[in-house]
Image (spheres, rainbow, N blue to C red):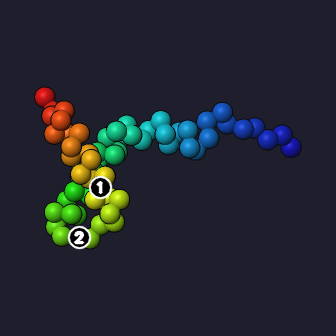
Amino acid sequence: MKIHHSPNNHAERRRAEYPDIGDQLDAVYKLARQLREQGHPLPPETEQWIDRCQEVKTKYPAA
């Protein structure tokens, strides 16, 4: 019996079809920001990450 390996494993195929990593991170940022605005407690690291992302978004606003 001969085993044939596909050159593209599942991780590579998934990676090719996922949205851009920047778009994924932006979606997570928006979710975290919304949770904070709704009063949900977040870990300090997440709070700091939200603040840093907002600083960058303010510094470089969308056109």
Q: Amino acid at mark 2?
A: His
The correct choice, above or below, for 43 with respect to 8 in the image is below
Q: Label 2's element?
A: loop
The numbered disc on residue 40 is 2
- Answer few, some or many: residues within 10 Å of disc 1's Cα (few below 14, many 20 plus, some between 14 and 19): few
Answer left or right for 42 relative to 34. right
Residue 37: quarter of image: bottom left
Disc 1 designates what residue? 48
- Up-down: is 29 above or below 42? above
What is the three-letter code of the residue carrying label 1? Answer: Gln
Q: State which tag comes first along the sequence, 2 or 1.
A: 2
For label 2, the crowd category at 10 Å Cα-Cα, with few meaning under 14, some 14 to 19 and many 20 or more, is few
Rendered location of residue 34, percent (x, y): 19, 59
Residue drawn at x 53%, y 39% as measured from the top left: 13
Please report contact status of discs 2 and 1: CB closer than 8 Å, yes or no: no
Relative to 19, 11 lies left or right: right
Q: Residue furthest left?
A: 63
